[in-house]
Each structure stands twice: as structure tokens, then as C-alpha cells.
Amino acid sequence: MGLMLERFKEQWARISRLEQIIAVLGWDMETYMPEGGVKPRADQLALLSDLAHQWLTSEETARLIEGAEKEVGGDYFSDAVSMIRVARRAYDKKVKIPRDLVARLARITPRANSIWIRARANSDFRQFQPVLSEIIELNKEQAECLGYAEHRYDALLDLYEPELTTTRVVRLFNELKIHIVPLAREIADRKDSVRTGFLNQKFSTAQQEAFGMLVLRDMHYDFTRGRQDRSAHPFTTSFSPYDVRITTRFSEDDLLSALFSTIHEGGHALYDQGLPLDLVDTPLCQPISLGVHESQSRLWENIVGRSRGFWKHYLPILKTYFPGQLDSVDQEQFYRAVNQVKQSYIRVESDELTYNLHIFIRFEIEKDLIAGVVTATDIPELWNAKYHEYLGITPPDDAQGCLQDIHWAHGSIGYFPTYVIGNLLSAQLFRKAVEDHPLLPKEIEEGRFDALLSWLRKNVHSQGSRYTLGELAASITGGDIPVAPYLGYLTEKFHDMYR
Amino acid sequence: MGLMLERFKEQWARISRLEQIIAVLGWDMETYMPEGGVKPRADQLALLSDLAHQWLTSEETARLIEGAEKEVGGDYFSDAVSMIRVARRAYDKKVKIPRDLVARLARITPRANSIWIRARANSDFRQFQPVLSEIIELNKEQAECLGYAEHRYDALLDLYEPELTTTRVVRLFNELKIHIVPLAREIADRKDSVRTGFLNQKFSTAQQEAFGMLVLRDMHYDFTRGRQDRSAHPFTTSFSPYDVRITTRFSEDDLLSALFSTIHEGGHALYDQGLPLDLVDTPLCQPISLGVHESQSRLWENIVGRSRGFWKHYLPILKTYFPGQLDSVDQEQFYRAVNQVKQSYIRVESDELTYNLHIFIRFEIEKDLIAGVVTATDIPELWNAKYHEYLGITPPDDAQGCLQDIHWAHGSIGYFPTYVIGNLLSAQLFRKAVEDHPLLPKEIEEGRFDALLSWLRKNVHSQGSRYTLGELAASITGGDIPVAPYLGYLTEKFHDMYR
């Protein structure tokens, strides 16, 4: 290994470890930290975020990347060439954001978060509007620093899903809309195909947890390199592939919520645990993007976890966890219940199909906010009009409307479209995995996920961030991310259920 | 506030926050971290330890301290003058240790720790001896860097208990020995004064935990600024007065162990929670020393928790937590059981009296190791001979002998004497608190600790590190730390019990 590459890797490892520590502080904050710890934790996080930004954008880092670029040669996808390429992209992006703006973004987050919590509790968007306006302005400023070819929103999209553009999202979403909107309407008229009365019971949270752990073990989530805790909102966090933690929450009134969120976070965690161990602390030991991450969680949660095959194996087991409570439920009834399509106000509680409509709405509003076509004060009216247009319902209040998501309060604008990218990619990946392993659906019926996980490990996880999203799609299916596999999957599933 | 002082405080806050983050990483490692996380955690800790050392010993810090020294004036014990004085001491000490030595000390710890765990499991000191020899050499090297007037060991003592010297420890320990050794022998002949058969039962750990929480609440441990978790070895850690956490461990075979360790850690935690909130992130928002810290834990655990008055209030309550299990036990019998004196091999399981003998032994061995009079290979023989001399017993194996403590594996030599300093100070403080509040013992009989805590808050906790140990003792009792109050306390208590 050349001297510059070696020194570059040392420098990158330092930056990477800072990011890991930031993640530990974040995990603790969401799980165990007592309320008194908020203020010092914000100071600790601000210190490390500033330091990480300084180190990444330092002249030293620039010099090492440049030196290593001259030094390394060979195959475009080799470890050495790839890691310098990925580091260069990160550097070029981050160096455009002034340290002062990083600090202002970091400082507004805890404040916006606490204002949002209060505003949501009061169901009053007006309380949140001023700080949200500040966040929008900061994001506009950030976009101007980052630069863009066509739309200012492109610069923000690129933070979460590199190379995605507004034009491309509009095109993809339009392709989806013309199928999903009428399909959802059509289904709304056939509600009686699904009976979910058996879900209106109390389900022991201890038993829910035990069943979730069983499923995680079957999925090969490695508990020697991870753990599950409880938090207000389920999430996955990774301190390196050696320590990837998930959280969940339980309600005895809701059997399905914790279960599917456990499978969802388990899917995220398998990706993080599967990142290349021999490349820890290099730029390649990272997920490609939020969209690719979401493809993993949604593949496990929806395509696997909401399939007939999955419940063929797991429903009899689930019944033993809740003796007497699910005896009269048959497999088809359960399958329909976990896939029930319902026009609902809340994104995170929505079904697989209408979920996309919730994202379309957020994207359209964000795009116009960043373009300056609309302002924060317009949001409640826009939001409600779009819910009426896409879902045929009007949120009764702000809490169930435009105050429901935490993303904006976190300062994140441009994040939502990655959820649909995840949906699209999940169907494409699963289709290819089944092509390569025709017995895979049969294995799922037996609660065995070895072939699926091996395929994902080989084609996605172990590649780290060697490929971009486009390169990953090309390496697997030889093309871009088409909507056809996902639309085919949705149409087949829901036509069958609601025929 | 002057410009230099202001800039000094900013710099110190950054260093202080790094130390807080190191503590968070340590807490997670001991409580929830999965086993896979060890290696990356060691890397994260090494990074931050190096950074904290670099920042503290930087030219920038030196310049700011120097500038502030010229700028601030006034009362020796004022905030500004005190914080610069404390910072100067820390800087002068740390700047003498080369960065390379800090790194070698940091790197040896995880290795020595895992070797020690294995050696202890195998009860074979020879497995631990080579790495311990390395640790001794590193500590000698550190002592030479730090400098000392008389004994090389002085430099190490000074790390944990500033201004304590070998000569002073020898003198203090000799004063104690001539009373404690014969007292312990005398008691050994009167074993039948205590009957502890009722402790040989299974005690629900859930009920043990619930009772411990009740006591912590009564002690005014603030759960909005702290929490209790489980770990292999109980400890207290502070991320700032806003977030002070304790841990414990439970065994259903041992009613007393978790209970007294909870009170002990609670005492530590009250000190950390009581540090001056208006001085957070300054050099004054720290405990004075390990000895002063230990005075707090031991005051609560022993002087309060093992008193007749305490159990007058709590025994009836404890009985309700274990219905039917303690009905026949009266208050005097319980009091004697929690104060039973027994010649035992294990320091952490020993009683209040013989505990000191365990420390004398460790001090004498450490002193000679660092002086170079003996080497690591001599330890088992020395250890066993001294146990025979002081306690009249000979450890049957290394696990119950010289491998029992984790301190050396942590790289800490010079730490043990602070435990006896804590004992001495605890008696002195309690005596003065009762002088100031004669009703205090009466309040303890009612499970009320307000007056005691207020006294400790005012005289110790809220002072932070404004005083040295000597200055604290002088401010409270007008003198040095005498052995008389502690010896008086011990003699009265155990003569009464075993008369």
C-alpha cells in the first residue's frame, strides 16, 4: 500500500470513529438518557459534529485524498480506487458548506425538535411555523452552497440520495401515480374483502417482544453484534458493523405495529451488520444511500414479512405466543389483515400501497418550499388539499396532518423521496434474488432466510459504498431503477387481495 | 469577565465535554454494549483520550491559563482564581506525560483486562504476570515523567489523591494498624455474637431492586438526572451533574450485597449530582479527589446504612418486601448481621473493619513494586504472607488472592490508598455534620436524610474542586485529616457489638 493511501486511511479512520461516537451519543439519547441530560448532550454532539466537519474538510484531508488519487491505480471498482473516489465525493460536498452553517444547522435541531413536540401536542402548526421557516431558509442556504444544475432542491436530494434529481423524482413519481392512485381508489370500494376484528384485543407486550426476537434470530440478525432496546420511535443505528442496534416500541393494543417495525429495523440492521468487515473505518464501509438502506428494510418488512409464505410458517407459531387469542384466524385472513389498504392520515401507520401517496405529497410540498414558490405558512392548506386529492380524506387537525413527521424538525428536507426509492429498489432486488434462487419463496414458507440473506450479503451489503445506486442497479440487473418490478408486485398483490 | 478568562473557559469546556463523552462510551461498554463492540470501542476511546490529552497539554491551553492568571485577581477561593489554579495544576501534571506514553497506557488496558479475566477464571497468576510487569514498568515511567520529592510512588498517589505522599500514607496506616489489627483479632474470638442464618435464603432480585430504588429515592438521588442499570461490577459514572448514573448487580443468594452497593453508589452519585451547576464545564465542576469521592460513598454505605438508626426505620419496610422471609429477625439481630466482622479473602466482600487491612496489604505491595524492591513474580508469595500476617488466613488460590481486583489490570497503581482516605474523611465529616445538626441521627431513624444531604451539599458537593483535600478538611474542622474520629467510630461500634 502506498504511503499517501496509508496516511489517508488513518485520517479517514479518525473521522469515521468520530461519526461512530456521535451515533453512540444519539442512541443513548433516544433510549436511556435521563431528561436532565438533554443540555449537556446537545453540547457534546455540537462539539463532535463541528470536529468531524473540520477534520473532513481540512487541508490535510484534501492533501491526502489528492496524494492518494495520484498514487492508486487499477480497476475502477477495486478497493483502493473506490475508497478514494467515495472520499473525494464526500470531501467535495462537505467542503462547500461553511463551518458556521454547519453550526447553525446543528444548533437549530434541538430547539426545533422541542418546539415541534409542543406544537404537535397542541396540534397547532402556527407554533412550529417560525422555526420551520428558519429551517427552510437554512436549507436553501445550504443548497446554494452545495450548488445544483437545475433545481435548488436537487442539492438537498443529493445529500440523502446522491445523483437523484428533482426531474427524475417527478418522472418516477408520475409513473407510479397513474397506477397507484386509481388502484387505491378502486380498493377503497371493496373494503369488505378484509376482516380485522380479531386485532381488537389486548396482546401481551412481553409476548410480542419474545415473538419479535424469534423472527430477528431467524433473519440472522447477530445479537453478538447488536441488541434491541425500546425508544419512542423505532430506529436502527450502527457504530460499525460490529455494533448495530435496533429499537422498537410496544403497545398492547397493537399486535402488528411492533412486529412489522421489528422486521423493518431488522432489515436495516442486516445491511449494517453485513458491511465489509475488512474495510471498517474506510469510506467503503458505509451504506450507499438512504434509498438503498430503505430498500433493505422494506424488502424484509413488506415483500417478505407481508407475504403469504411468511405467515404460512409464522402464523401457527404466533398463535402459540398468544394462546386462545388467534385460534379462529386462518392464514388467508391474517395475510389480508396485515395487508389491509386504508386511506389514513398517518404515514407511518399506512399500508404498503398508500404509503407512496404520503410521500408524493411531502415531496411536492418540499420541492415548492425550497424553490420559494410557497412558504411555511402555506403548508397546512397545501397539505390538506393534497390529502384530499390523493387519498380522498382531509386531516381533522395539524397533529394528524402536517405536524406528524419529525423530519423537518430534524432539519432534514429532501429526505422523504428516498422512501419511495427504497420501495422501487426492494422489488427489483427481490425479483433478481428469486431469479437466481428459484427456491427462495419456498424457503420463506419454511421460515428459512439463508438464501435471501446470502444473496443480499453478496450483491448489496458486502459491497459497502463501492457502487452508487445507479451502479448497484446496473451491476445486478444491468439497468437503471425501473418502476415496473415494483408496480408489478403491487398490482399483482392487491388485485389478488381485492379482486 | 476578562477576555482571556472567557477564552480559557471555552477551551476548558471543550476538554470537559470530551471527558464527558469518554464517560458515556465507558458506561455503554459496561452496561449494554454487545461483545462484538469491544474492538471498535477501544479505537473510539483511544481517539478521544489522545485528543483530550492533546487539547489539555496544547500551547493554546498553556497560553490561555497564563493569560488568565495575569488577568484574574481577588480572593484565593473565588470562582475565577480557583478555576485557574485548578486548571494550572492539571496542566502542569498532564504536560509532563508524553503523548506516546498516554497512548501506550491506553493501549495496554483492554489487553491487560482481557488477560486478567482469563487468568482469574483459571486462577493462575502466572498468566497475568507478564502484562502486569509491563503495567508496572509503564507506571514507573509515568512516575519518572511526573517527578516526585521522595518516593517514586508519590507521583502515582498524586494522580488519584493530590498531595498525598507515601510517607504520609505509611504514618496514617501505622496509626490505624496498631488499633485495627488487634481489634479484628479480638473480635475473631467472639464470633457467636452474630447469627446470620436467616440470610441463607433466596431473595427475589426484583424485590431487592424495588427496595434499593426506595432507598435511593429517600436519599434524594435525582432520577431525572440519573438512572440505575446492571453491570458485572457496580459503579457510578458522571457525564456532568445533569446525568449521573449508577449500576448494580443482583444475586438471589445475597440480600445484602446489592443493597449496600446501591447505597454506596448512591453516595457517590449524590456527590456528582451536587457539583455546582453554575460551574458546569469549568475546572471547578469536578470532585476533589478519589478519596473525597470515597468518603461520600462510605459515609452513606457504612456510617448511615450500617447504623442501628437506619435499620430501625428500614427493617420493617424490608420485611414487607420479602413477606414471611424475615419475620423472626429483630432489629438488633439484623444490625449485627450487616456488621458482621469476618476474616475473609475478598476485599469487596469484607466488613467495615477488616476492609482497611485489605488496603494496607495492597499499598505495601504496590509501594515496593514501584520502588523496584520487589517484582511482579513475587506478588503471590507476598500477598499470601501478608494475608496470613494481617488477617490470619491464607488465600487458597490466586483467584481469591492476588488476582481478585481489577485495578492493576486497568493500569491503576496508587489508587487503593484512597479507599482508606475515604474512610477517615467519612467519619470526620459525619461527626461535624452531627455537631452542626444534633437531630441528624434522629432523622436517620425516621428515614429522613434532608439535613445530612444539605450539610454535605453545602460543605462538600457544591464546592466542587475549589478546595484540596487538606483545604476541605481545614475549612470544615480547622485541621488536617486525623485518624481519631474514624478510630473512635470503629472502636465504639465494634466494642459495643462484640463486648
Image: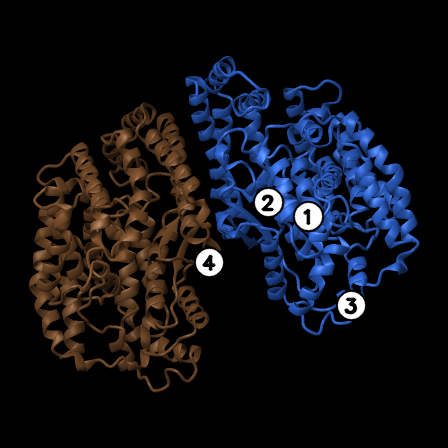
Chain colours: A brown, B blue
CA–CA distance in space, label 2 to label 1: 10 Å
Is disc 1 surrounded by few (<14), some (14 to 19) or many (20+) residues within 10 Å? many
Outermost bottom residue: A328
Percent position (x, y) of residue B301? 70, 49
Which residue type carries mark 2?
Leu
Q: Chain of mark 1?
A: B
CA–CA distance in space, label 3 to label 2: 31 Å
The label shown at residue B329 is: 3
In this picture, residue A345 sits left or right of residue A54 = left
Picture quadrant where residue A198 is located: bottom left
User: Are the residues under marks 2 and 1 on the same chain?
Assistant: yes
Decide which of tag 3 and tag 1 comes sooner along the chain.
1
Quarter containing the C terminus of chain A = bottom left
Which residue type carries mark 1?
Trp
In this picture, residue A322 sits left or right of residue B105 = left
Residue B170 in the image: above or below residue A310 = above
Q: State the residue position of label 4.
A: A223
Q: State the residue position of label 1.
A: B300
The residue sitting at 34% across, 54% down in the picture is A271
Which residue type carries mark 3?
Val
Marks 4 and 2: in contact by CB < 8 Å? Answer: no
Percent position (x, y) of residue A432? 22, 61
Q: Chain of mark 2?
A: B
CA–CA distance in space, label 2 to label 4: 35 Å
The label shown at residue B270 is: 2
Is disc 4 surrounded by few (<14), some (14 to 19) or many (20+) residues within 10 Å? some
Of residues A304 and B184, the one drawn nearer to the viewer in this rendering: B184
Which is in the foreground here, disc 2 or disc 4?
A: 2
Q: How many marks?
A: 4
Which residue type carries mark 4?
Phe
The residue sitting at 60% across, 59% down in the picture is B214
